[in-house]
Image (cartoon, rainbow, N blue to C red):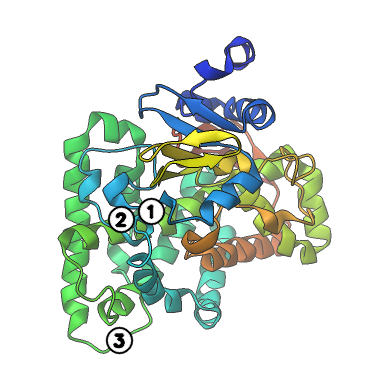
Amino acid sequence: MHMDDDVISALEAIDPSRADRFADGSIHPLMKRLRQEAPVHYCASSEHGPFWSITRHADIREIELQPERFSSSYQRGGVSLIQPPGVESLVTFIQMDPPDHGPRRQALVPAFSAQEMTRLSENIRNRTSDLLDQLPRGKTFDWVSDVSVRLTTDMLATLFDFPWEDRHLLPEWTDWIVSLERIQKEPQGRMEKMGEMAAYFLRLWQERASTPEAPDLLSRMIHSGALGHMDAPEFLGNMATLVVGGNDTTRNTMSGLAIAFDQWPEEREKLYADTGLIITAVPEAIRWQSPAAHMRRTVTEDTEFRGKTFKAGDSVVMWYISGNRDEAVFENPDRFIADRKNARDHIAFGYGIHRCLGARLAELQLRILLEEMASRKVIVRRVGPVVREAHPFLTNVLSVPVELH
């Protein structure tokens, strides 16, 4: 833990983006200190350059609602503090401002409608129940690889109507795209993997361009005005966004659920006794895990905010991992509480025009997983240490060794 140096260090010396904090959990007491003492905090130097940190829930929402003043554009550095080589060539709708952002996002909205969720739910339930029935009893296995990764990979393959026998490529590509270690140490290999992904999707695109529109995500993109004629950088950027977004966020929340149920078994028992609580437990799991630790914006004009002056060009980092544990909004915020009344007030999906497009699908998968676990009274016991990635952008859970009882 880094409690000692956080407690004694001067506020201005703190770098909230230091990756090791996200692996060992020391990020949470640090963020609590910033919320209390410096809710708008300036870090003058980090490996990602200087940036402002926004740690309070209300302040994050306020910034999210001003896209004209706080830009997401790839031309200004995009939405993450981490800037891999070649990032400027990745054009994606989440890294666009109005008016470019809206029509592209809108083209994908029908793939996540309530009607589509109904269509997908039987498929998700069948796969989830089959998987739970196949898990070993009384034997150690890794909840991340054997449950979280498998369920989200199959869902993503269904969403894209991706060739089933090749679906193992989806988490492999995701890991290459987001791994901080690979970004830093294997940039060339990473770009090659992304090229491999783009080539595969391009082949599927060309096959489906000559067929009528189908409900899968690729077909919807092909047949939409806004996304039907993307150039190479935008095609690669959007495929990377959809693969990572559809994979990592739900995967890490499913892993977080296993951790929370082991840590607070009384919450699991509460839920199993009353499955009506699943409606609050799903957003609570997402709040508690906060799959995206932050989103970044670039200031477009000199701006006063909470008594501080942001200069045009400054990086502003909204720490969702902090806003979701803001004591002003959530009582006892570090604890997972299955029946938390205001769990839906979380900002893990963002807020405003960039709110996560796949939020409804993520919630559906988590709801069905909880329903199927509850119907079997599955008890997950952790039998080894949780391994988290040292990653200041995505709260990646790498391993949770468990036994089922």
Which image quadrant is residue 100 in?
bottom left
Q: Which residue matches tag 2?
A: 240
Q: Residues within 10 Å of mark 3 (few under 14, many from 20)?
A: some
Looking at the rendering, which quadrant does residue 198 occupy? bottom left
Residue nearer the viewer, 261 or 84? 84
Q: Residue type at mark 2?
A: Ala
- With 104 as the anchor, is 336 left or right in this view? right
Q: Secondary structure at mark 3?
A: loop
Give the x, y percent position of residue 221: 30, 75
Disc 3 target residue:
213
**Cα–Cα gap, marks 3 and 1:** 24 Å
Secondary structure of the residue carrying numbered label 2: helix
Assess whether mark 1 and mark 3 are in contact (beta carbons under 8 angstroms).
no
Q: Position of residue 26 (x, y in %)?
A: 59, 25
- Vertical position of residue 11 compared to residue 144: above or below: above
What residue lies at 69% left-to-right and 52% top-to-bottom?
284
Q: Is residue 138 visible?
A: no
Q: Nearer the viewer, residue 400 or 33?
A: 33
Residue 377 x %, y %: 73, 57
Seen at 44% across and 74% down, the residue is 109
> Residue type at mark 3?
Glu
Residue under pointer 1: 244
